[in-house]
Amino acid sequence: MKVILNSLAYSLYRVIRKAIRVVGLTNALRGVLSPIAEKLIWRLASKPGQIFTVQGHQMVLASGDGRPSIGMVTGVFEEGTTRLFQRLLKPGMLVVDVGAHVGYYTMLAAKQVGPTGKVYAFEPDPDNYAALLKNIELNGYRSVVAIQKAVSDRVGDAQLYLSATVSGNHSMYHHGTPERGSLPIETTTMDTMLEELGWPQVNLVKIDVEGGETAVLDGMVQLLSSTARFNLILEFMPAFLHNAGVPQRQFLDKLASTYPQIYFIDEGNEPVLISVGDGSVLVDRLLAGEQSGNLLCTTELLDEY
């Protein structure tokens, strides 16, 4: 009976999701309706500690009062980024997952790099971190090192503001969305972590920190200036950057100063190569805050992977 309810609930979610994305419905309205729909479906079709099969992995998607993106369960979570992430990784590589949440990309990375590779996963929230540890255990990944810290531009302490809607939306900045309090967390920098490890070769860094991306980049100056290049996947969310006091142009220019190739990851299609200074419609929309999504920063054209 529970399986049937789950199936019906997630089918309902897909219908609601399509309805929300009809032509003419604004991003702002989608931003309000999508979390409401996801919360309803999550309550209908899940129970505390429930284990889901996600991209071939056994995973707990929420711990405590948290609620994940339902897309992780339905298989529609960042499809384009997921495909690209898997495509870029090879056995033996080293991956750093900054803002690991419950480990969706951590699990993908661990599978792709295999036992000869290494994955470092940073997640400061206690509930998310507990779920991350559980998922590492459930899937038997000994190559994963989980670290309960936020990556930023300094070593010290900070406040993490807890989203009242989705457990993956906690942030070190206020975003004008419902919150359920805050908690103190430890922070570190990428350069500090890598120095402690003896500067191993990094192959891919994924950053999803709800507006704190620039701070993470500022804390990895040595890594970015090194001759050993790595792929970088990170979120570009204009509203979150604004709340962190970072102009969109400054953010894109910072990336372009280090990486000759920047791709906008179209979740439903192939990645789109962009040039920050070319004045294209896509770049204009990114700078105007009308478009958001994940970016791939790389030194090579994708055809070479």
Image (cartoon, grey):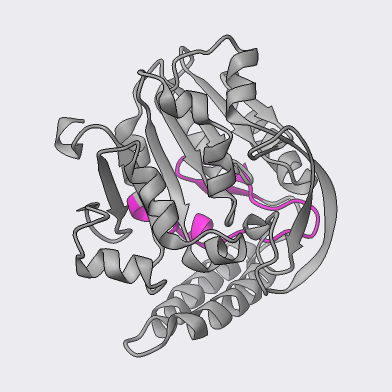
Q: Nearer the viewer, residue 182 or 227?
A: 227
**Name of the residue lying farthest toward the left:** 303
Q: Is residue 206 visible?
A: yes
The residue located at (39%, 59%) in the rendering is 249
Could you say where residue 179 lies in the image, as x and y percent from the top left? 76, 69
Q: Nearer the viewer, residue 111 or 231?
A: 231
In-image side of 281 versus 81 (left or right): left
* Residue interval drawn in magenta: 51-80
213 is higher (above) or lower (below) than 77: above
Q: Quadrant of residue 177?
A: bottom right
The residue located at (71%, 46%) in the rendering is 128
- Magenta stretch: residue 269 in it? no
Q: Nearer the viewer, residue 32 or 260?
A: 260
**Name of the residue lying farthest toward the top:** 198
The residue located at (53%, 47%) in the rendering is 214
Quadrant placement of the N terminus: bottom right
- Magenta stretch: residue 53 in it? yes
